[in-house]
Image (tube, rainbow, N blue to C red):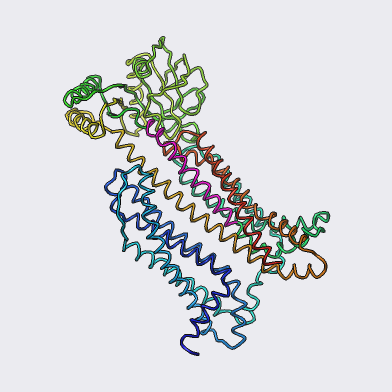
Amino acid sequence: MSRGFYLKLSLQNIKKNRKIYLPYLLMTTFITAMYYIIYSLSVNKGLDHMRGGASLRQMLGMGCGIVGFFALVFLFYINSFIMKRRKKEFGLYSILGMEKRHLGRVVLWETAIIGVFSIVMGILVGILLNKLIYLGLLNLFQAEISLGFEIAPSAVLAAVRWIGIIQILIFLNGLRQIWFLNPIELLHGENVGEREPKTKIIMAILGLLCLGAGYYLAVATVNPMAAIFILMIAILLVMAGTYLTFTAGSIALLKLLRKNKNYYYKTRHFVSVSGMIYRMKQNAVGLANVAILSTGVLLMISTTFSLYVDLNNIIENRYPRDIIVSGYRTTEDETDKVLQSFKDAANGLQLETENLFYYSDISMGGVLQGEELLTDLDSVYGLSNSDVRNIYILTLDDYNRINGENKNLEEGEVLVYSNRTPYKHQKVKLLGKTFTVKEHLKDFSQSSSMSSDVIDSLAMVVKNSEIKMELADLQQTVLDNTGNGGYSNNEGFYGIDVKGDKDQKALYQNRIKAELETLSSSYRIENKEAGRMDFLGTYSGLLFIGIFLSLLFIVATVLIIYYKQISEGYDDRGRFEIMQKVGMDKREIRRSINSQVLQVFFLPLVTAGIHTGFAFPIMRKLMLMLGLNNTDLYLAVTGICFLVFAVFYAMIYKMTARVYYKIVS
């Protein structure tokens, strides 16, 4: 054979099979472009000049690894559809006299053509879009827009290296399939799985159990600190349950439909149900993949978008003033010195200040059992995490000052505020002392420490500092007796707004910091503007990566659906030809197609909606850890994301159903 024979044959094969190769080529190009872009952004030194840029680059580097992993999974999975369709063709070549080494060369040239073209085009597209996306990222970051155009050589090399490795692995996988099958097996390769599968009751039950366990973990998890670990377990269980349920459950459902004679023996149901039963063994995996990818898109977009939308509220809760100072084991004398440093710094820089607030509290951990708060570890062992509380004790004077009120308390009375789960009792017992709840407070707006807590918090306002310090001594006794170490801590909080720009506020912060370093207690000073940029960098990065990965998942979902439809179309074409010969007209064919597609097409969307619904409680707790306390906003964004995705999904249905109809008719 001439040297160019395999190249010409490969080009001819790709052209002849363009209906299945073109989407794969576009997918590979798209993934290459995405990989180049996110890698290029992760090494962009321009981000280093922005506050929060370092954390953003770190997240982009992590996103690069995620894109690379899914690129491997998606390209392998989609290529499996192509190889399935091509096996019959390779079997024919083999019968006509081509040896396996010749077929291997054909696969090698086809893979090389696809790989080189998609890598070159992907990098070119990536370079063209990179600047646009970089500007969008800066805009998202609310950073200054810079001009100029640059190409990242390291990103080019990384994209060539990784996509090239994937193409080599795909080639080896294709070679393996050809090498270990004889010509007859290749000829019938596309019909593998065309036997009626058995109903696997145990697999279906196991799938339902996995789903139930995953849902239970997502709903029952109370402690946000454990939410990340439990979420990972829940995701694995739900993924396993989805695959098992789709594989076994769908077959069982179709067989039930077949037993229903009133349903089954209708023209539009007969062909579709009988055909799907035979193919469901292999197509169920594709449907499960679509369901899982759809769930991933919904969760990523709804969480990252909610965080970004509520960013200002998160910052305001975390930083109620321009300058925030917190000190450990502070005394009244040192409180006066901190306040004096505020005045001295303002006078020295000739800046106006306002909205001064300060208070101190004693904090401890406890478990609520009835109306008693247990604070020693031996007592709380074995109790539910849902009853764990952060407890804050402060005086009535501090409360009235920071909230602008004039409440009164008698001996033995307290005011109680709970930030999330309401405290409903009329008494509260702590460290052996029982107090009467005079009022359940509905708001406690100035407590920055409570607003950032990831678990339920309970604030107790006591009559005076003597009672507060008495409770501190009792806490210290518990700590000493239990041998757990630690000290009762009287923590001071101070905040003030400064009229000036961010540079003046930074100077003001530095002046105060220098003053505080002369005091005996340890103090931490924070600047709202600096904190805002850190939050903006982190949440902008999360939103960007969320959008980036969602786009990748959506494209993969569309292609999986597309290949599933054309694969089924070719499988069903023979059946519909027979049905036309016995009298089925085009209208009945279309009705049968609609029946078949509708029976399974929207099943992944419904499943994704159920997964998202059950994931909502545990995702909400993760959002609390990130500062998002606006459940209504998160719920609304999740609902809107699902509706938009459902509309998009219906559009995919329209397009792919048309392709399917053209093939079978």
- The quadrant holding residue 659 is bottom right
Measuring from the top left, give residue 186's x and y in whole percent: 61, 78
Which one is nearer the viewer's eye here, 446 or 410?
Answer: 446
Q: Answer with the quarter of the image where residue 155 lies.
A: bottom left
Q: Residue furthest bottom?
A: 1
Number of marks drawn:
0
At x 42%, y 38%, the residue is 625
Tell me the quarter of the image containing the C terminus. bottom right
Residue at 44% over, 40% down: 307
| Residue 47 part of the magenta-drawn span | no
Image position of 284 (left or right of 625): right
**Residue lying at 72% horizontally and 71% vertically, measured from the top left:** 574
Image coords of residue 439 (percent x, y): 47, 15
Magenta-highlighted residues:
288-317
Q: Which one is nearer the viewer's eye here, 488 or 335?
A: 335
Location of residue 425 in the rendering, given as x and y in whole percent from the top left corner: 52, 20
Residue 307 among magenta residues: yes
Q: Is residue 405 above or below residue 636?
A: above
Front residue of 16 and 485: 16
Magenta part mainly helix, strand or loop? helix
